[in-house]
Every structure is written in structure tokens, then in C-alpha cells.
Image (cartoon, rainbow, N blue to C red):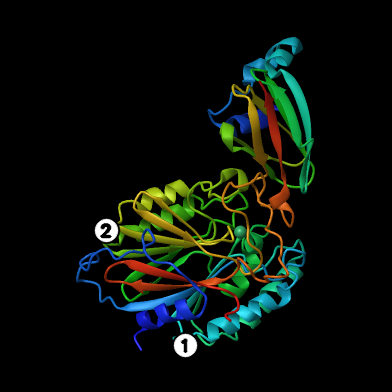
Amino acid sequence: MSAVSRRQILLQLGGAIAVVGASAMLARNTAAEEAEGRVVEVDVRRFKFTPSQITVKRGEVVTLAFRSIDFVHGFNLPDMGVRADLMPGRVTKVRLQPTQAGNFAFLCDNFCGDGHETMGGNLIVEG
Amino acid sequence: MDRRHFLSLAAIGGGAVFASGLAGCTTMGSNGGGGKYSAQDFYFVQLSDVHWGYQGPDNPDAAVTLGKAVATVNALEVQPDFIVFTGDLTHTTDDPAERRRRLAEFKRIIGDLKVKDHRFMPGEHDASLDRGAAFKEFFGDTHYTFDRQGVHFIVLDNVSDPGAKLGDEQLAWLQADLEKRDKAAPIVVLTHRPLFDLVPKWDWATRDGAKAIDLLMPFQHVTVFYGHIHQEHHQMTGHIAHHSAKSLIFPLPAPGSQERRTPLPWDPAQPYKGLGFREVEADAKAASYKVTEFPVVRT
Ligand SMILES: [Fe+2]
């Protein structure tokens, strides 16, 4: 990820979640990997997230790496107060460390066409 | 016949749902608006979420539903003073030419309404893919104000930005408009999406809607009428009442009642169930509004 896009994410996400800071990029790969935790790549295109069901363990550090193909889709996980714009042609990373078990719906929250209403998924956090 | 009397009769005889005692719809005392407004009763009709151009199983009668609603409005014994359309006039399409064709057809059909005084606003289906460009060609501005009998109407656009934002520019415009108003003035806001977080996981929210509500909060008599959620719903944020309208295409499930906001299936035994429009009778002096719901076809 470029410094630009990382800054962008920091701006977009505010304080709701911790995103790897710019300084971490200077660190060795291993440190960066640890900070990101497990990376789940998510393909994003009209009108679905693939995978749409993402299972993580409670307390696990996981980074969702969104690759949008065709539109500035949105990723919004309202229960965790997390959202990001997913610019096409770019990988947008969202780092999570869920503290609560449960099934949390996420959705595309940038209107993207006839089918937008069905574009969503679930983050399943196992206790 | 007195309109209020007529409406009560119509509600009983016409199978309409008669809603009274709604929050924000109750009489707030005869001095509520003060004597300075040349207040007089008037009423308007709210039509919402027509989704002209939709084709699918959730409304196999989509090609005639709007025409039937127009006929029902035209058959009202007392015609409204004006008619508002709170967005999603058309169903979305990627094709700019098709979008304009749908907007033109919509405009032609509602041209049959006897009452010619109309106020329009877009929904995300009309405006989010081209930031309102086609809508503006047909219906003009996406946010504006107008006044009726001492009631100040503010139309807000929370859809031209695909991210469901009013945006700082429009918020500044709203603030400037409100600065000119008396705190006791009756204000009605018309918009498409809920301004408050109704069900964020269903996209039933306006991303910066709280900022608009904050600006409106100092005003004593604010009522919001909106669409988007395809059902009647009433909720307060502080003293501000928010009333959503039914759609004219397909009903959606009750807020948060299931995982996804999939449309309620069409029931051939009860066509148009859950669809309809409403009348809003305004008592400007008291800043109170009486809402009466009507079905698409009255039997
Ligand atoms: Fe809508």
C-alpha cells in the first residue's frame, strides 16, 4: 500500500479503529505482518463482496484488504463504527480487532446501482 | 363541507388508515405558532418512492401502479393545495438515456394530476449515479425552500452524493436559511432518506444527517416528512418528529426486523398491499399536522 492510500485510510477511518501507522512501513516485513495480523483479501465489485461471510476469532487482529474493481464502493460495519471508501484500482486495508463475539452485518454504503441494496455481508466473530 | 370533517369521513368510508395523535401531529395549543403568522389550514399530498421503470417480481403491476395512484388522488373530494414527491421517482439505471426516458415518463404520468402545484426531490435511484444531473434537467434544484400559509418548507438533498451526505455546502446553506427564521416559526423539512440513524446496516441513514438535526434543534416546531424506507414510520429526535411515507412500488420490512432489507413479496390476493400515499393537513398556526394514509386504490 502506498503512503498516500494509507494516509487516506487514516483520514477516512478516524479514531474508530487502529490502522497501521506510517512509521510501521519502515519496519521490517515481519513487524508489519504482525501489526496487520491475518490478512483477508476481499474482492469488491457490483454488487457483492467476495467473500461475503468473513469469520474471525474474538480478540484476533485481522486486516481486511479490499480490492474494488469497478466503483467507489463503501465498506460500512456500523456495529463497530467502521467505514471506508473503497477506491477502484487500489487496495484499501481495514484493521479490526473485534472484542465481542457475534454476527455483524456490513454493507456497501455508497449507492452503486441497481443491486446496491443487496450488497453486503457478515463478519462472524467466534467467541 | 369542512375539510377536517370530510377527511374523517373519508378515512372511515375509504378504508384509509386514520392516524391521529401522532408525535408531532398533535395539536400543540392554539398559541403554539404565535399570532404573527397569517396561519390558515391547508393540506398537501405526499407521494414517495415510485421507482418508475422498475421491473421485477416484487411488483408485477409496476407499469400501472403510479397511474392508479394518480387516479386516486384525482378522486379525492377535496383536492390538496399541492403535492410533494419525496424521491425515488424512478428506479435507477446505468444508462443516462434510459434514466431520462424514465424521468420523462414519470413527469408525463403525474401531469395527469388535477392539482398542478408540485414539489420534487430526488432519491438515490434518481440522482446518486450522476450527482443529480438528469433530475435537475427535469425538475430543477435538488434543495430549496418554499413557504405556505406561514409554514416554511425546506427541501434537503441527501442523495446526490452517493455516500448519502448533505455535504458542508448544503449544511451551510441550511444554516444561513435558518438564521433568518423565528425560533417559533413552523418548519417542515422534506427529504428522501431519514436524517437520523434509523437502521445504518440497511443504509437507512444520512451520513451527516445529525448535523442538520443539530441546526434544526433550536427551532420549536420542526417536522420532517421523508421516504426511502417504503413504509409509514414515526420517530422523534428530541422534539423533532420524523414521518416516513409508504411507497408506490413495493413495501420493505419493518426497520431492523430481519437481516437484510429485502422487499416484502407481492401478494396476488392483495395487490398493492403496503403501498399508498398520504395526506398531510397542516394547521399552520398550531404547527400541527394531521396525517391520513390512503391506499393506491380505494374500494
Ligand atoms: Fe431511496
- Residue B282 percent location from the top left of the image: 36, 72
Location of the C terminus of chain A (image quadrant): top right
| Residue linked to disc 1 | B77
Q: Quadrant of ligand 1?
A: bottom right
* Residue at x 58% of width, y 53% of height: B254
- Left or right: where does residue B109 sit relative to residue B113? right
Dot 1: few (<14), some (14–19), or many (≥20) neighbours within 10 Å? few
Q: Position of residue B99 (x, y in %)?
A: 71, 68
Chain letter for the residue marked with disc 2 in the picture: B
For badge 1, the amino acid type reads Glu
Residue B41 rendering spot, x and y as whole percentages: 33, 78
- Judged left or right of residue B262, residue B8 is left
Between B148 and B294, the residue placed more toward the observer is: B294
- Discs 1, 2 touching: Cβ within 8 Å: no
Q: Are marks 1 and 2 on the same chain?
A: yes
Horizontally, residue B202 falls left or right of residue B80, namely: right
The residue under label 2 is B183
Looking at the rendered structure, the kind of residue marked 2 is Lys
Split into 4 quadrants, where in the image is the N terminus of chain A? top right
Q: In the depicted view, which residue is nearer to us: A49 or B1?
A: B1
Q: Earlier in the sequence, mark 1 or mark 2?
A: 1
Q: Residue at x 31, y 66 (%)?
A: B287
Quadrant hosting residue B97 = bottom right
Q: Residue B271: percent from the left, percent from the top?
A: 68, 71
SS for dot 2? loop
Mark 2 closeness class: few <14, some 14–19, many ≥20 residues within 10 Å: some
Does the beta carbon of the residue at mark 2 sit less than 8 Å from ligand 1?
no
> What chain letter is assigned to the residue under label 1?
B
Q: Residue at x 74, y 66 (%)?
A: B96
Q: Is residue A94 above or below residue B33?
A: above
Q: CA distance from mark 1 to mark 2?
A: 36 Å
